[in-house]
Image: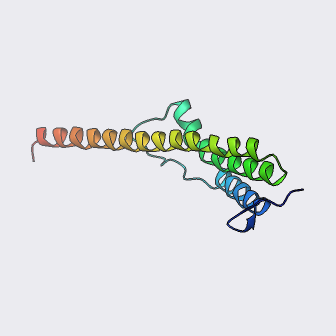
Amino acid sequence: MISETLLGVPLVFWGGISLAIGIAYYFVWPKPELRRASARTMRDHVVLRYFHSLVWVLIAIGCFLGSAGYGDIGRWFALLGIPVYILFLVYVVRDRRKEDAARAAQRSGARARDAGTPQ
């Protein structure tokens, strides 16, 4: 086993930390509110639910492969985490905007109903 390092720390350690973060995020994740104004599609749910964990697992695989002497393949696995993370962030921002727009529509609908009722 080759002892490759990152910042002087063995890649096996970084891989273990990354894997632990990925597993932790798999079990402890920010669940959507019960009273969402807009429903998520299955694709949105899958990306928002699993892709953050997938990024950390890809980094862990890259670290483990790098520490085993397969640095080039390991680097590709770790770099694959970048587009996966970008996709995850795009979905987070899109979901937040969609939810904010749905809540604003609910508020404006409620104001319109309230404006039409006699006091």
Task: Locate residue 41 relative to residue 46 in the image: left or right.
Answer: left
Query: In this rendering, would 108 be left or right of 31?
Result: left
Q: In the image shown, does 61 or 32 lie closer to the viewer?
A: 61
Q: Does 86 sit left or right of 66 as displayed?
A: left
- Who is closer to the viewer here, 95 or 80? 80
Q: Looking at the picture, how far across and down is residue 115, in whole percent?
A: 12, 42
Residue situated in front as seen by the camera: 46 or 52:
52
Viewer-nearest residue: 73 or 103 = 73
Q: Position of residue 95 (x, y in %)?
A: 43, 40
Which residue is situated farthest in the left direction here? 118
Q: Quadrant of residue 10?
A: bottom right
- The colour style of the image is rainbow
The relative height of residue 69 versus residue 4 in the rendered view (above or below) is above
Which residue is located at x 25 percent, y 44 percent?
107
| Image point (68%, 53%), residue name | 22
Q: Residue furthest top?
A: 42
Spot occupied by residue 101 in the image (x, y as percentages of width and height): 31, 40
Residue 91 at x, y percent in the picture: 47, 39
